[in-house]
Amino acid sequence: MRFQTPLVPARLIRRYKRFLADIQLDDGTEVTAHCANPGSMMGLAEPGTRIWVEPNDDPKKKLKYGWRLVDHENGHFTSVDTSLANRALKEAFTAGEIADFADYPTILPEQKYAEKSRIDFLFRAPDRPDFYVEVKSVTLMRQPGLAEFPDSVTARGARHMADLAQMVQAGHRAMILYLVQRTDADRVGAAGDIDPTYARAVTDALTAGVEARAIAAHITPEGIEIAGPLPFDRPKV
């Protein structure tokens, strides 16, 4: 997945109200950018952080820049736009690049299911159970190499795990898919100290037969591509 418009570098001044960030472009201009991330962005929103933003000339948008990447200035990047996870995965799914999903010819994004949820992707194939896949964008890292989810309490995330378990009980296949949107991770785990309820919900879902996968991403200011699998550490609760 390539960015629609070439990204430009900037420095973060501050992130506030979750979806807003004041930034300074390299020419010294200070502007406000949209931050498409509802989480805490722990460790990624320190003032002075080197970032990459995407300009736009859409007259319908009030903000002319969108914050896309954190540049760790050591060769590694983190994608902070949570919507990019599904975009990158959809391209990979459509191209048959991920083995778990290559045999499903029908891919339906954002389908209603359970009582009040939407599944990120519903896969269908003749003579196979429906396959429900919930995607989580992972950006938190507190220990070198260990990417964790979530970075803040997520009642919605815990509900999704219960919904996936219901799909398995109904005879379908279900998976929680963690896309690690940072390039310096070598494994993935649940941040049980941040949200113990979510960690327990993951454990309960896995016990019920929900599958778990973690996938790395190759990230540059040019775009995001799906890379190989990463080991997932089952929560210890």
Image (tube, rainbow, N blue to C red):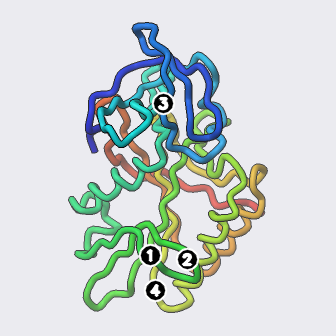
Please state which of the two labelled residues, at mark 3 or mark 1, is closer to the viewer.
3
Circles 4 and 1, Cβ within 8 Å, touching? The answer is yes
Dot 2 or dot 4: first in sequence order is 2
Mark 3 element type? strand
Determine whether 10 is above or below 93 in the image. above
- The residue drawn where x is 70% and y is 49% is 152
Coordinates of residue 195 in the picture (x, y in percent):
75, 55
Given residues 112 and 188, the one toward you in this image is 112
> Separation of disc 2 and disc 1 at Cα?
7 Å
In this view, the residue in front, 160 or 143, is: 160
Q: Residue 33 carries which label?
A: 3
N-terminal label among 3 and 1: 3
Helix, strand or loop for disc 1: strand
Mark 4 / mark 3, whichever is N-terminal: 3
Query: Is 76 left, or right, of 102 in this rendering?
Result: right
Q: Are marks 2 and 1 in contact (CB under 8 Å)?
A: yes
Q: Which residue matches tag 4?
A: 172
Identity of the amino acid at label 1?
Answer: Tyr
Q: Are marks 4 and 3 in contact (CB under 8 Å)?
A: no
What amino acid is labelled 4 in the image? His
- Report the residue at 45% width, 36% height from top: 183
Q: Is residue 101 above or below residue 95?
A: below
| Quarter of the image where the N terminus is located | top left
Residue at the spot 26% in from the left edge and 76% down from the top edge: 106
Assign a secondary structure to mark 2: helix
Q: Residue 132 carries which label?
A: 1
Per the image, label 4 sits on a secondary structure element best described as: loop
At label 2, the amino acid type is Leu
The residue that label 2 is drawn on is 164
The answer to whether residue 21 is above or below residue 164 is above
Left or right: residue 121 compared with residue 189: left
User: How far apart are the two marked residues, 2 and 3, measured between alpha carbons?
Assistant: 35 Å
